[in-house]
Image (cartoon, rainbow, N blue to C red):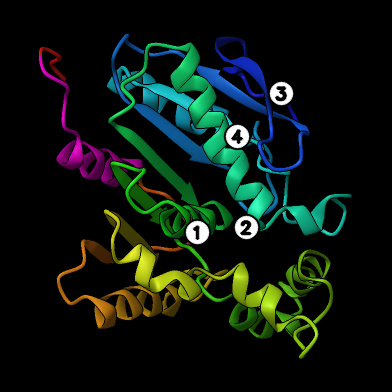
Amino acid sequence: MSKPKHLDRMTELHVTSTLDGSSEPSLFHMGGEGKPLIVGLHPWSGDRFNQVDNLLPFAEKLGWSLLLPEFRGPNLRTNPRAAEACGSRLAKQDIIDAVEYVKANYPVDGGNIFIMGVSGGGHMALLMAGYAPTYWRAVASFVPLTSVETWYHEKKDNPVGGSYALDMEACCGGEPSPATYDEYKYRSPLTYAAEIARSETSIWSGVYDPSIPCHHGWDMYEAAHKIDPKAHVFLHMFDGGHEMPLDEAERWFLSRYRPAAGISC
């Protein structure tokens, strides 16, 4: 994997996990003093370096800070810590720990924390909306899977995507079965529909997505609105595939940004 071209504008942080005491890495870029923080989540097969060249220019355009946490690495069977990745409690708490570290050590606007991701990062963004619904000013989830078990069966016999099923087995302790159902459920955003319904979340699903069928976004939207018809969970079915249109994220974040007194956007 080639080195991100913008990596020199980011600082590596090491944050102690409040759950298991391990030292977990993140990348951080300081934007304007007192401005919001964007938390960017890597996709299924990525790590903290994956979104540097994509999200750093996005954050710099806004003048905001950017945090790219590792949260136990890629959701791959080649990851020695696969069981700790893919939405485990450790992975979720790593993100909160990293944000709290940044808030304590850098002059970011702690009242305006935004989180976003694409694909597996969109999946994790929804899990974070469920884990801490009111912690985020807004959540942007692009082309997420919302049921790990459903996606497993959609990928299992697919000659192109079958490797993803093997990754899910590594993360969840085996194929879906009575022994592993709890793990598949724990790592699925649909499990947390009631919590996500309390958050400010927008989901984008590509109608022609060849990797994650667009029904995953609809399923999440429907589940949240069954719990609360007035939930601020929004769904955008766009005419595209497996992608993250950053202009949509920018519009969504700016619509939810609430500057502190005396701070202008």
Does any portion of residue 238 appear in the rendered image? no
Which of these two is toward me, 1 or 262? 262
Look at the numbered disc 3 and give the secondary structure of its residue.
loop
Q: Tell me the distance, in whole angstroms, between the alpha carbons under discs 1 and 2.
A: 7 Å
Q: Tell me the distance, in whole angstroms, between the alpha carbons under discs 3 and 4.
A: 17 Å
Numbered circle sitting on residue 87: 2
Give yes or no for contact between labels 2 and 4 (Cβ–Cβ under 8 Å): no
Q: Quarter holding the N terminus?
A: top right
Mark 3 or mark 2, which is nearer to you? 2
Amino acid, disc 3: Lys
Sequence-wise first label, 1 or 4: 4
Numbered circle sitting on residue 3: 3
Amino acid, disc 4: Pro
Q: Which residues are magenta?
A: 246-261
Does any portion of residue 249 appear in the rendered image? yes
Tell me the residue at 57%/34% (across/down).
Answer: 97
Amino acid, disc 1: Leu
Q: Is residue 48 left or right of residue 63?
A: right
Sequence-wise first label, 3 or 4: 3
Amino acid, disc 2: Gly
Sequence-wise first label, 2 or 4: 4
Q: Is residue 148 left or right of residue 106?
A: right
Sequence-wise first label, 1 or 2: 2
Q: Tell me the distance, in whole angstroms, between the alpha carbons under discs 1 and 4.
A: 15 Å
Residue 59 screen position, x and y as percent: 38, 25
